[in-house]
Amino acid sequence: MLGYLAVGVVIGPNALGMAEDSDTVRHLAEFGVVFLMFVIGLEFNLSKLRAMRGHVFGLGMSQVMFTIVPATMGSLALSWLLPQVWPMSWQTGLALSGALAMSSTAIVVKLMSDRLELESEHGKRVMGVLLFQDLAVVPLLVMIPALGSPPEVLLRELGLAAVKAAGLIVLLLAGGQRLMRWWLTLVARRKSDELFVLNLLLVTLGLAWLTELAGLSLALGAFIAGILISETEYKHQVEADIRPFHDVLLGLFFITVGMMLDWRPILEHWGLVLVLVTLPVLFKLLLVTVLAKLYGATMGVALRTGLYLAQAGEFGFVLLSLAREHQLVPSLLLNAILASMVISMLATPFIIQWSNRIVMKLVASEWMVQSLQMTNIARKSINTSKHVIICGYGRCGQNLARMLEQESIQYIALDLDPDRVRQAAAAGDSVVFGDASRLQALVAAGLGRASAVVITYLDVPGAVKVLATARAHSPPCP
């Protein structure tokens, strides 16, 4: 991402000027945003949204609402106190607070997947918030163009925007996927790869054009196209077709973000950039932590959730680009805000990498919780030897456990889904809650005494991590 941004800055109109024509830059940026939104929409999962509705419409909705409202009010108060530094109308404040509410789905989900945390307590809460943010971007993409309307028609435009947003959400959650499935089935029956890809482009660009024709944004139409396709059986084929272009399209988007950056005002106002990095990150960290605690999480889980969601996100860039297009953001502030968002996203991998140490240092009870987990695992495995450690107790893990029981071979299974662990334990299975990627959990499960370690899930990076840990600390164990 840093490389793409650097290229954008270098070739943009504020450096070498290789893309001097502002119209060229604008059209390139629009295509970057359109295809980025299509890819993000394609990865959206309505069935997961329904399954996690407690986290999504509880913690997720609260996070978005309690970010937008206080941030807008704070922006107005700052504008009144420091009009020279922060010249801001309520329309601009509302648009910026919408961008502030977004977190980086692409970065956070990838890191959680690598760390085997998608099914952990904080992982489920993070995913719930990210899913609601994806859904919340629909009304925000509708609202921001309306905010740029003249004052005399602003109220009418906002009302019309609310009606459009409600209609689009109904389309997404109700009958849109049926029509998309029918159309893609019709195309697939022709058994032509070229025709299938051409229709993907037709659907994406066609819906983008229709939403712009309706007075909305191109990005919104592309996002809807991705969501509708994600709910059909053709999703995996579309992902395979689009995969070669995925990173290129993401790179195109970040290059256009870099083109918008002007490095000279950033150097002149570096203090403002530092403030715009620090305050939003701390605000979101505190807000998400408090909300997660209020929704029943332990303090350690709540703080981890806050650390994972404190940064800016791709949708924030999209909303900021839209606000800039409708002249809602002063040019002086635009560069500082863009730079602060980029820095917060670049800091995210380091924050997540150090999250466990931060939580252990700040939350005294977390050490006790983790110790109890390790004690529970050790208690289950203390009288076993030459047993099998099963990492993951999904369908494959359960089938393996049944086979081992038939052969009178002892086993202990580690899984991060608390509901699955509770049900399996109630049925008398030797299953405990634990993260197989952590050495402490494997040691507590009797790694040194085990005859084999079996990894039963499909996450290749996670499986390689478990494999490396097991081999490093118990070489004889196959």
Image (cartoon, grey):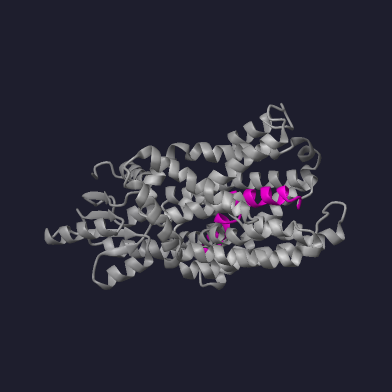
* Residue at figure coordinates x 59%, y 54% from the top left: 211
Assign the magenta stretch its main secondary structure.
helix
Residue 337 locus on image (x, y percent): 72, 48
Vertical relation: 420 (above or below) 105: below
Q: Where does residue 339 sit, x and y in percent of width and height? A: 69, 43
What's the residue at 69%, 45% (across, down)? 338
Judge whether residue 298 can be spotted in this image: no
For this rendering, which residue is in front, 397 or 478?
397
Q: Can residue 393 be seen in this view?
A: yes
User: Which part of the image, by quadrant, shows the C terminus?
Assistant: top left
Q: Along the line of sight, which residue is nearer the eye, 319 or 182?
A: 182
Q: Report x, y in % for residue 275.
A: 74, 50
Q: Quadrant of the N terminus?
A: top right
Q: Does the magenta stretch include residue 308?
A: yes
State the image quarter where residue 195 is shown. Answer: top left
The percent position of residue 208, horizontal first and vertical second, equals 56, 49
Residue span colored magenta:
301-328
Residue sitting at the far left: 407
Q: Tell me, yes or no, whether the highlighted magenta stretch contains residue 100.
A: no
